[in-house]
Amino acid sequence: MKNRTILLVEDNARDEALTLRALKKSGIANEIIVTRDGVEALEYLFGTGKYEGRDVSILPHLVMLDLKLPKLDGLQVLARLREDERTKRLTVVMFTSSSEEEDMIKSYDLGANSYVRKPVDFEQFAEVTQKLGIYWFNLNEPVPSH
Amino acid sequence: MNIPQPTPHEIHTSETRYRRLFEATQDGILILNAVTLQITGVNPFMMEFLGYSRDEFLGKELWEIGLFGDKGASQTAFKVLQETGYLRYEDLPLETRGGKRREVEFVSNVYDEDGQQVILCNIRDITERRQQEVLRERLAAIVKSSDDAIISTDLESIVTTWNSAAEKMFGHTEAEMLGKSQSLIIPTDREDEVVRILDMIKRGETLNHFETERIGKDGRSIDVSVTISPIKDEDGNITGASKIARDISELKRAVKEIRNLNAQLEQRVTDRTAQLQAANDELESFSYSVSHDLRAPLRHISGFSGALLEDYGDVLDEIGKGYLTEVREATREMSRLIDDVLQLARVTRTEITPEPINLSEMALSVVDALQTEFPDRSVKVAISEGLSARGDKRLMHILLTNLLGNAWKFTSKTENAEITFGQEEVEGESVFFVRDNGSGFDMAFSDKLFGAFQRLHGSDEFEGTGIGLATVQRIVNRHAGRVWADGKVDNGATFYFTLPAIKGIENEK
């Protein structure tokens, strides 16, 4: 339990603002790192590019990954994470507007831990975000770190 | 002139020789008295030929045994004979005793026999020869009038016959071709083929309906179908080849034309399919975009107006707060609309996987979900047991959700609300129905029921996007069924649908 950061991969500033607000309102005061596209997310996780030199042994507790992203999309990022020994067990929740069955199936096939649709309605959005936080931080037993 | 007289021995020898000739010859011989025209001698062949005995011949006149038809005719004939000493008929009809008609060549000479005028008639049976001639003429006529070129060559490929169809087909006249090599009509690149065919012919083989190419006098290429067979002489030796050639240029052109048209048609189908595919792909990406991109700004409108209300509600009066509530309500509606449109699009493009479905169970679960969503409602729901059909499970679920959801919705202002799902026979057809005792509708507008975005109720009366029944109709159509409705204002509505067995899809999962 040394690390409680959340990596939010979200290209839309408004979604970011609403998500951060909802997480804070639900009492999740952890450090939240935001990356704007798929490439940046991988750079953060693997300590390359912009994040050269970052201690990659410190992985986020939770990755909230949007599907539609510039450069590399959410599915591509997920695939790369699952291929890599260091990140293959990382908790990744797809957090997206898409209700396309195909997106869901692909996400689960690639090893997403969860698929959560962003509700349009403000109250539902807040509720979902809160539940998400509670589940992954309070109920879920994470993979033991070595 | 001193002519030496023959010795009696010589006379005897001559007599024997001519007697033998007279007896053995395969021509008929009659000897007549030139004055009386009575028969004085007949040889055995003649007797056998006409079927009369020697006695029946002797002493008779020619016409009496059927020669020359009647007495008058024979007298006229013999008058000519007496005058010229010679009479010849190329073919003279004779009748045998048995009534058979024979054709003969008739030659008679008058000569002097010891001072007496004698007529010697030589009669040759030419019946068979005549028949052969007729047959040959007939065959020649057939060959001549044939539309197929009929050609014969010897084993050196020299043309021996060339009919008029050949003249027409190849442009060379018979005169031009007889005695010439047939290579005149063979394309240079086909000479090997001709050699091979000739080898076959020499082996006694026949080539049937062989499609090849020949050249006309004007250099034009002619597509032909040829049948080539060996010509044999009486002893069975192969002496040449007969060729029957049919011009199939037109046929070839027609076949080519058909192939072209088919190819064009196929190309057109391919093009159209590609266009359709492109349109489908576009629709796909449009749906995706609707699903993802249109929701985002809506979420932001809802989110920030909600945040505003929550975080700064204390600086707004009730009217201001009311406005923000309306904004959020509107986004909720818009969101539902997007969901419904997406569902309609999905229903159209999803592939159908038919399987047996227990509709009763499915309807029960839909009603359970409705009851959970609206716990305050009290609706008496009757679902017939054992309703089943073959269909796509997902689509059937959407169908029942829409129909039962509608019934649920339109009975919300009805006391003792009742919904029935069952099956009945309508004009010999098994029909499913969902019936309610809710607000109903005016049958005058029934044609609008199933159109997308068509609503018969104001949204302040009943919520809705007007897409549900359009979706229902598409699902039923995709299952090759029909859907229709019956209703009355304030008197409930019944929606009927059929789900015929879907043919041609057997891969049950």
Image: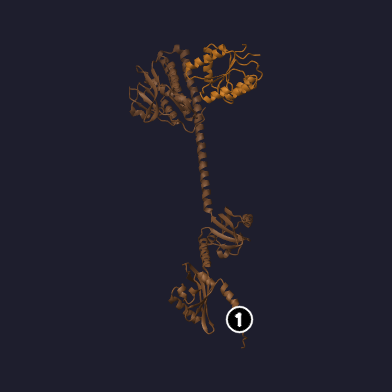
Chain colours: A orange, B brown
Residue B185 versus residue B439 in the image, above or below: below
A20 left or right of B203?
left
Residue B197 x %, y %: 62, 55
Residue B85 versus residue B417 in the image, above or below: below
> Which part of the image, by quadrant, shows the N terminus of chain B?
bottom right
**Chain ID of residue with mark 1:** B
Q: At label 1, which amino acid type do we have?
A: Ile
Disc 1 target residue: B11
Residue A29 in view of the camera: no
Residue B292 in view of the camera: yes
Residue B198 x %, y %: 63, 57
* Disc 1 residue crowd, few under 14, some 14–19, many 20+, Cα 10 Å: few
Disc 1 secondary structure class:
helix
Residue at point 54% right, 55% down? B246
**Of residues A57 and B78, which is closer to you in this image?**
B78
**Of residues B467 and B173, which is closer to you in this image?**
B173
Residue B368 x %, y %: 44, 17
Residue B35 versus residue B356 in the image, above or below: below
Q: How many marks?
A: 1
Residue B459 x %, y %: 38, 22
